[in-house]
């Protein structure tokens, strides 16, 4: 579990790195702030009581995402290599099946480091921000908070919509249940049938949409568009700027988001370690 001082040091380092390259580092703060003592997921490097390097592991089923940073004034000194070696040792013990290195697409320092690592680009995703547009008349759709009774349906949505194995999806959702982390999880219904799910997370005064999925058999009926517009209206009324992420290869999702007023602002690349 990270201490309040460590979290503060990580935030300070993040801001310095982002300012240096005008980038956004995806450090999954909700996960950082709810770590447990049973797993070694965070690796910190201090010099003279100043945090100059950080690497975090973020588990999603049997996939581990890795994101980290080194202070601009302390790069090319082997700091990140040391942190990654430590993290790889832990992941080897845990028998992690897939390791994805996450890096801002516009980060030259990340690209230079990745050339030294046995990896290849797996996919990229856009981070999109909603630009206020007229959404038209509101159409009927029901969105309610997820309960324990919805767990199996949400697992099946991950399997059918995101291509995740049932084992990985179940592990991910069980981790959420064990942490009693139900805030912001919703299911989408129409005519008393569950057709999809969506998650809304508030971070640093922003609303982020994650895990938005509609069962394939219900796609193409405008239900996803109705649900997305409902969430946009609600979050906009609360005064939040609204963001989401989407795989750059997901053409249908991109068209939907752009039609609803989202525009790409940043991109993240994911490299699969070989």
Image: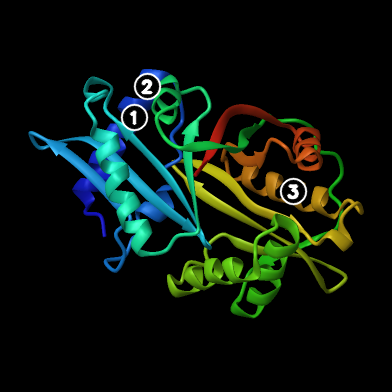
Marked residue nearer the N-terminal end (1 or 3): 1
Q: Residue 149: image x %, image y %?
A: 65, 80
Nearer to me, 10 or 52: 52
In the image, which disc is placed on residue 15?
Answer: 1
In the image, which disc is placed on residue 228?
Answer: 3
Q: Which residue is mark 2?
A: 19
- Is residue 65 shown left or right of residue 221? left
Q: Residue 80: image x %, image y %?
A: 29, 35
Residue 143 appears in the picture as rendered:
no
Quadrant where the N terminus lies?
bottom left
Q: Is residue 147 above or below residue 1?
A: below
In the image, what residue occupies the spot 62% across and 37% down? 125
**Secondary structure of the residue carrying numbered label 1:** helix
Q: Is residue 231 above or below residue 243?
A: below
Spatial CA span between label 3 and label 2: 32 Å
Marked residue nearer the N-terminal end (3 or 2): 2
Spatial CA span between label 2 and label 1: 6 Å
In the image, which disc is placed on residue 257?
Answer: none
**Secondary structure of the residue carrying numbered label 3:** helix
- Is residue 224 shown left or right of residue 18? right
In the image, what residue occupies the spot 56% across and 59% down? 184
In the image, what residue occupies the spot 84% across and 59% down? 216
Name, please, the residue furthest toward the bottom. 149
Q: Is residue 60 above or below residue 174?
A: above
Label 3 environment density (alpha carbons within 10 Å; few <14, some 14–19, many ≥20): some
Label 1 environment density (alpha carbons within 10 Å; few <14, some 14–19, many ≥20): some
């Amino acid at each position: 579990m990270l201490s309040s001082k460590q979290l503060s040091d990580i935030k300070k380092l993040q801001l310095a790195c982002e300012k240096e390259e005008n980038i956004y580092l995806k450090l999954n703060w909700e996960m950082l702030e709810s770590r447990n003592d049973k797993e070694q997921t965070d690796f910190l490097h201090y010099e003279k009581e100043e945090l100059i390097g950080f690497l975090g592991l973020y588990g999603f089923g049997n996939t581990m995402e890795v994101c980290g940073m080194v202070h601009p004034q302390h790069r090319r000194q082997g700091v990140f290599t040391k942190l990654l070696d430590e993290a790889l040792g832990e992941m080897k013990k845990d028998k992690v099946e897939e390791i994805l290195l996450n890096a801002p697409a516009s980060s030259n320092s990340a690209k230079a480091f990745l050339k030294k690592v046995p990896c290849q680009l797996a996919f990229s995703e856009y981070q999109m921000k909603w630009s206020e547009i007229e959404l038209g008349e509101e159409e009927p759709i029901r969105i309610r908070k997820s309960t324990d009774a919805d767990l199996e349906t949400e697992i099946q949505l991950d399997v059918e919509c995101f291509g995740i194995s049932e084992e990985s999806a179940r592990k991910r959702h069980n981790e959420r249940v064990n942490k009693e982390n139900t805030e912001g999880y919703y299911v989408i219904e129409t005519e008393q049938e569950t057709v999809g799910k969506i998650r809304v997370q508030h971070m640093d005064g922003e609303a982020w949409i994650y895990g938005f999925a509609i069962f394939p058999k219900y796609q193409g009926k405008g239900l996803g568009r109705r649900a997305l517009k409902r969430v946009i209206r609600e979050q906009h009324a609360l005064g939040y700027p609204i963001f989401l992420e989407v795989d750059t290869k997901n053409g249908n999702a991109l068209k939907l988001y752009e039609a609803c007023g989202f525009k790409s602002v940043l991109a993240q690349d994911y490299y699969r370690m070989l």
